Amino acid sequence: MLNRRDMVVAAVAVLVAGAAVAGLSQAAGTPQMRSRVFQWAQLKPEASKTGERREVFDAPTATLDRFASHITTLNPGQAPHPAHKHPEEELMIVRQGTLEVTLNGQPTRVETGGMIFCASNEMHGLRNVGTTPAIYYVVKWFPHDLGKPKP
């Protein structure tokens, strides 16, 4: 016969299982990104305090938990945020303008056509040091095992 304690344990187990299933269905709700083209004219700009941002994509792929990209337009003299680090790697490609990137405390100027690679968990930050808006593409990838302990 079930006692009160058994009923509480069973109820908690049902709630936890329900939450897990809901989490899985939410993750499964983001379709895997397939081959496609992203047209500049179709990327809607969203104003920010320092310029504007265009979301390009953020979705799982066959080999990644997430693959994300956005395009930032940064006004002269502005930085999008303070220097930081994160576990995912990222690549930035300067489409227009002049940025100063600081990688692990070392500042470097990057001009139109330049590329910036930010390794996992290394400090990085940037600022528009030019007199015109700077535009740069950001691409980030999140491997399946990102943040999981290595064996």
Image (tube, grey):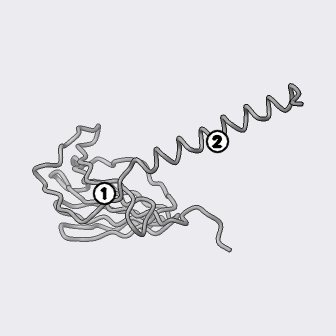
The one of 45 and 99 positioned closer to us in this rendering: 45
Residue at image location 66% in from the left, 39% down from the top:
16
Q: Would you say 42 lies left or right of 88 here?
A: left
Quarter holding the C terminus? bottom right
- For the residues labelled 1 and 2, say whether their Cβ atoms are less than 8 Å apart: no
In the rendering, which numbered label is found on residue 17? 2
Find numbered disc 2 in the image and state the secondary structure of the residue it sits on: helix
Q: Indicate which disc residue 8 carries.
A: none
The answer to whether 1 appears left or right of 42 in the picture is right
x then y, percent, for residue 70: 28, 54
The quarter of the picture where residue 52 lies is: top left
Per the model, the C-alpha gap separating discs 1 and 2 is 33 Å
Q: Position of residue 44 (x, y in %)?
A: 18, 43
Residue type at numbered disc 2? Ala
Q: Is residue 11 above or below residue 55?
A: above
Instruction: Label 1: state its secondary structure.
Output: strand
Place of residue 113 in the rendered image (x, y in percent of width and height, measured from the top left): 19, 70
The residue lying at 29 percent from left, 47 percent from top is: 78
Percent x, y of residue 134 = 20, 55
Mark 1: which amino acid?
Ser
To which residue does mark 1 refer?
69
